[in-house]
Image (cartoon, rainbow, N blue to C red):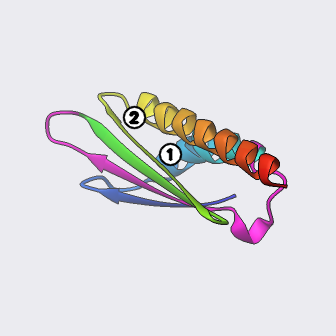
């Protein structure tokens, strides 16, 4: 999966990229293994807030469905984990709907 990462009030270092790829990209990619490689593109935006820590949003465009997850927490890892869990839940629901239609 191609994971495009951007930061707002936060420089996106190699450590942050590796953390996001490990905890978000690889885990979500396991649930999208039947999709074409060209369709596996996700946009992750990480925001550093002055008081509330980190916020992040994830968008994945699938055929006939956009997956969107958003979270915020004091800890960046917890934020990424919450986004991953939200996205995986939505992907599972999408795959079930596609199964029912076919």
Q: CA distance from mark 1 to mark 2?
A: 12 Å
The magenta region covers: 31-52
The residue drawn where x is 75% and y is 50% is: 32
Examine the structure image and report whether residue 47 is included in the region drawn in magenta: yes
Q: Quadrant of residue 34?
A: bottom right
Residue in front for this viewpoint, 69 or 2: 69
Examine the structure image and report whether residue 22 is included in the region drawn in magenta: no
Q: How many marks?
A: 2
The residue drawn where x is 76% and y is 52% is: 98
Mark 1 or 2, closer to the camera:
2
> Percent position (x, y) of residue 79?
41, 34
Q: Quadrant of the C terminus?
A: bottom right
The residue sitting at the front extreme is 101
Residue in front for this viewpoint, 16 or 23: 23
Checking the image for residue 15, the label placed there is 1
In this rendering, the answer to whether 31 lies above or below 78 is: below
> Percent position (x, y) of residue 20?
54, 45
The residue drawn where x is 70% and y is 58% is: 1
> Percent position (x, y) of residue 40?
69, 62
In this rendering, the answer to whether 40 lies above or below 25 is: below
For the residue labelled by badge 1, is the local secondary structure a helix, a strand or a loop? helix
Checking the image for residue 76, the label placed there is 2
The residue sitting at the bottom extreme is 38
> Percent position (x, y) of residue 81?
51, 32
């Amino acid at each position: 999966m191609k994971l495009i990462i951007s930061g707002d009030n936060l420089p996106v270092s190699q450590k942050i990229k590796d953390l996001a790829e490990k905890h978000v990209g690889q885990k979500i990619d396991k649930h999208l293994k039947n999709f074409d490689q060209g369709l596996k593109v996700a946009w992750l935006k990480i925001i550093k807030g002055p008081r509330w820590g980190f916020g992040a949003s994830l968008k994945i465009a699938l055929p006939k469905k956009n997956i969107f997850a958003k979270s915020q927490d004091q800890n960046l890892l917890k934020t990424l984990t919450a986004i991953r869990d939200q996205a995986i839940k939505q992907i599972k629901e999408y795959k079930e709907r596609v199964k029912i239609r076919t």
